[in-house]
Image (cartoon, coloured by chain):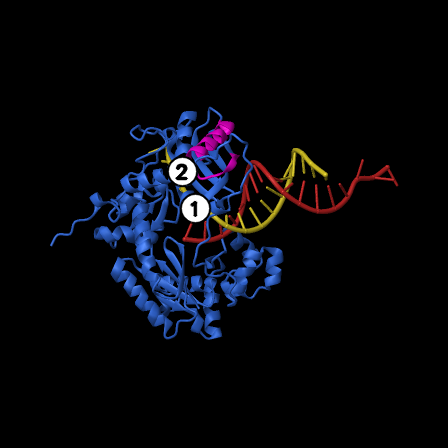
Chain colours: A blue, B yellow, C red
Amino acid sequence: MMALVDLNNFYVSCERIFRPSLNARPVVVLSNNDGCAVARSDEAKALGIKMGAPWFEIRDLAQTAGLVALSSNYALYADMSDRVASLVAGFGPQHEVYSIDESFVDLTSVRGDLVARGLHMRERILRWTGIPSCIGMGPTKTLAKLANHIAKSAERKPGSYPTHHARVCHLGVLPKLELEALLALTPASDIWGVGRQLTAQLADGGITNALQLARLDPALVRRKWSVVLERTVLELNGLACIALEDAPPNKQEIACTRSFGQPVTELQALIEAVSEFASRAAIKLRKQNGLASSVQTFIRTSPFRRGQPQYSRAATVPLHRPTADTRQLVAAVIVGLKSIYQPGYNFAKAGVMLLDLQPVHVQQGELLLEDEVLPDQGHLMQTLDRLNVRFGKKTVVLGSTGLPAATRSWDMRQDHRTPHYTTRWADMPLVRA
DNA sequence: TCTGGGGTCCTAGGACCC
DNA sequence: TCTGGGGTCCTAGGACCC
């Protein structure tokens, strides 16, 4: 039996812990650059604000409906997520942190009343961290996801599902007919793995709810769509196809991409930007003890500025030998950038991807010429990482990322950011007796 | 004026190879 | 008259997830 613990309106819930005045008010958390709404409180959803709504389109609601918008504070969310994950680890013998606000837990060997256990877990997370959550259970990951969806909807949208499923919903103990009734109540688009395109294609074939989807012939689904959707159909029928990954595999690629706070035209500013992105990506790479064999750089104009000339190019640069050395990665990224840069465009976004990753320990040996010396084996980078952990990010950086004190035209906007309450001494909240 | 970031998997066309 | 088959690599794009 699989359980999914999903934290409600997670980013908003994190902000409310430290600013209780936000309770019961419409609140959204904005993406980087204060671009669009990526988290919404129930009250904000009730105002009709859609996931991903651009801030400039909903800004009026701040005046007319008391909407509060906050810039995203990932240091806070990541820390709160870790705290919750450590509690969820006690829920069952094996768990998988699926995203910043979701964990799967394998309850197969757990005896007793799982619903009672789920309610208890939910209560503990709320009491110990202040974050509300819902828990779904079922024989497969897809059904646990569905159960979670039912638990949330039954709590928030009266009439959508029977109220006894609210907050904690266990599909694994229901009689067949009752489960089918719930599937029939669920639009196909609410099923994990069914996005916009598939929803439209399924609807063309008359498939609009989860029960119809579950009753399709898996072989036909594979032929007409893909092995991915076939797995979804099988999982809806209780056949587990997606395993729990309790030790997350290393990344196959590592990306760092950003939209700019304002348009960038000059090569020099782009060099600074991609140098910084490569530096950040390199830190992630060294954290997973990996080496990159090639790097990709891309730059693009804004697809939303239709009137302006559009340009979008990417270049992949292979490395002589796989490396995790920031200097070599930055150098390669700049080579790539120069090969695709064109003056005269308003660039809105750039990014760096580290590709063909491999673990340090399987490094390919090589024949050396007699006077050739192997490059630095990472001691400099280890020291760099340690200094930046101990004395703070950006204590030591590469010069090509631009001087830290300089105003970098490409830096992102963050006009409504809250303090790093839990990860910076100076930002720690004071409690008055 | 103003539209996110980080992933995985899959497909497809063109260049090139034997 | 009549012009193959199998493969890799690169680039680009699209689907899905959170």
Q: Residue at x 34, y 29 (%)?
A: A408
- Asked where in the image residue C2 lies, by quadrant, the reply is top right
- Residue beneath disc 1: A289
- Asked where in the image residue A64 lies, by quadrant, the reply is top left
Q: Is A345 in front, or is A184?
A: A345
- Residue A301 in sight in this render: no
Q: Is the N terminus of chain A in the top left, top right, bottom left or bottom right quadrant? A: bottom left
Q: Are marks 2 and 1 in contact (CB under 8 Å)?
A: no
Query: Looking at numbered disc 1 in the image, what kind of residue is underneath it?
Result: Asn
| Viewer-nearest of discs 2 and 1 | 1
Q: Residue at x 30, y 68 (%)?
A: A120
- Residue beneath disc 2: A258
The label on residue A360 is none
Query: Looking at numbered disc 2 in the image, what kind of residue is underneath it?
Result: Arg
Q: Position of residue A118 (x, y in %)?
A: 34, 68
- Residue A95 in sight in this render: yes
Question: Please, which chain is the residue tagged with disc 2 on?
Answer: A
Q: Secondary structure at mark 1?
A: loop
Q: Is A67 in front, or is A7?
A: A7
Q: Position of residue A243 (x, y in %)?
A: 49, 61
Residue A131 falls within the magenta-colored stretch: no
Q: Mark 2 Cα within 10 Å, few/some/many (few <14, many 20+)?
A: some
Residue extent of the magenta highlight: A315-341
Q: Residue at x 25, y 55 (%)?
A: A24
Q: Secondary structure at mark 2?
A: strand
